[in-house]
Amino acid sequence: MSSYTFDDLKRDVAEGRIDTVLACQVDMQGRLMGKRFQAEFFIESAWKETHSCNYLQATDIEMETVSGYKSTSWEKGYGDYTMKPDLATLRRIPWLEGTALILCDVLDHHTHEEVAHSPRAILKKQVKRLEAMGLKAYMASELEFFLFDQSYDSARESGYRNMKLASGYNEDYHIFQTTKEEEVMRAIRTGLQGAGIPVENSKGEASAGQEEINVRYADALTMADRHAIIKNGCKEIAWSKGKAITFLAKWNYGAAGSSSHIHQSLWSLDGKSPKFFEEGGKYGMSPMMKHYVAGLLTHASEITYFLAPYINSYKRFMAGTFAPTKAIWSKDNRTAGYRLCGEDTKSIRIECRVGGSDLNPYLAFAALIAAGIDGIENKLELEAPFVGDAYGAREVREIPRTLRDAATALTTSKMLRAAFGDDVVDHYTRAAEWEQEEYDRRVTDWEVARGFERA
């Protein structure tokens, strides 16, 4: 929740500090889509609602009108959805002159019910399930990305070849190298802080030009809202300085992948009592935490699509790169897909290391919560923690190796169909199928170089 209020906006508009309001919904890819309002009109009318074409919740990453969706199609005419601004998300955007931003829920134009397959609605449904159990999920997502010393336009014009990274060498925790990148990274930290997103730190990551930004944990919906704004803000700030950023999970075969590790814990509704911690319990884990983690592991394959939604996402899962290949849990072990952090303290939590930086936070958080709830409700037993190098482990649960495998696990998941609804699962199954279909019919540079002469 932002501390910036509607009254603050009215004052800033009256005194000439704000002239534009961005009203945004979050699309299936986790991007901000919407309209730029003249601030006076937003205050007069649009704060109640505005409208958008319903295809925004049924396109691919290139905004293609994909066939096969039940919710919308050319046959149905691509009508409107209603965008309902959530005033709790209103905030100033320091890196855009005279601009405020607000996130919107997506409603059916006729019934004004939330559109079930819209990402924010999917997460809100799981949050309500927790609330009915007297619980609140707190989450934090760490975002990694690559920074390039060139613009988006020049990168595109070059065909994304011979890209110029911001660094020439691995800069993991490297202070001198990240000093060279401070023009961008300081602007990101201070910009996000000024937008009401409490920043903890930025750091160099495990490849040349790779960065990480970390912000304070929050309840699941607030953290997902922050995550979406962070990604958009990082791109806008880099663009304003003639630089480019990519959140592609694996931008280059020779570079490390970019992740979005998700830390999660459950607390009482008032946020005062940690439900994952039990003093004297093994590792400090409560029975509830053990059941929750067991749910994550039991349904690990089923939820992978929401952690790795593209063909490229699966290129990241490579041994020896700090990206996991096994869906197992371990104590403070970065080779496992799920890592126990904060052992024997009230800050005990489970870190999901499966997700890439390309995930949609609302969908990822919702899938994790749904799996955890199933573990709690069915009192699933937690297996023993893995010890050692998970990359070399045999006969243990593996992360699906391809989008095709993840899509099959998604569509056959009884747990997700019960938690999200059949129409929602079918909607995202179609998204996965389309991504696979598009890839299957494309000819890649790798194929041409490999076989042009020698085939």
Image (cartoon, helix red, strand yellow):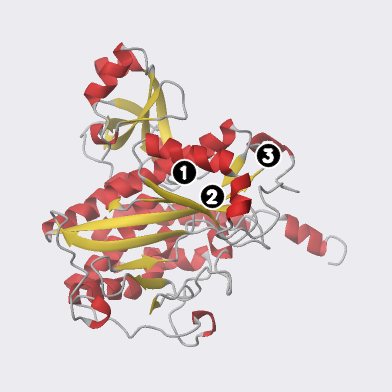
Rendering coords of residue 433 (x, y %): 49, 56
Q: Which of marks 1 and 2 is nearer the N terminus?
A: 1
Three-letter code, disc 3: Gln
Rendering coords of residue 285 (x, y %): 24, 76
| Distance of label 1 from label 3 (alpha carbons) | 18 Å
Rendering coords of residue 108 (x, y %): 26, 36
Image quarter of the C terminus: bottom right
The residue identified by callout 2 is: 247
In this rendering, position of residue 104 left or right of residue 278: right
Q: In which quarter of the image is residue 26?
A: top left
Residue closest to the eye, 366 or 168: 168
Q: How many labels does the image show?
A: 3
Three-letter code, disc 1: Lys
Residue closest to the eye, 58 or 86: 86
Q: Residues within 10 Å of mark 1 (few under 14, many from 20)?
A: many
In this rendering, position of residue 158 left or right of residue 100: right
Residue closest to the eye, 38 or 425: 38
Measuring 58% from the left and 54% from the top, which residue is drawn there?
Answer: 175
Q: State whether residue 310 is above or below residue 17.
A: below
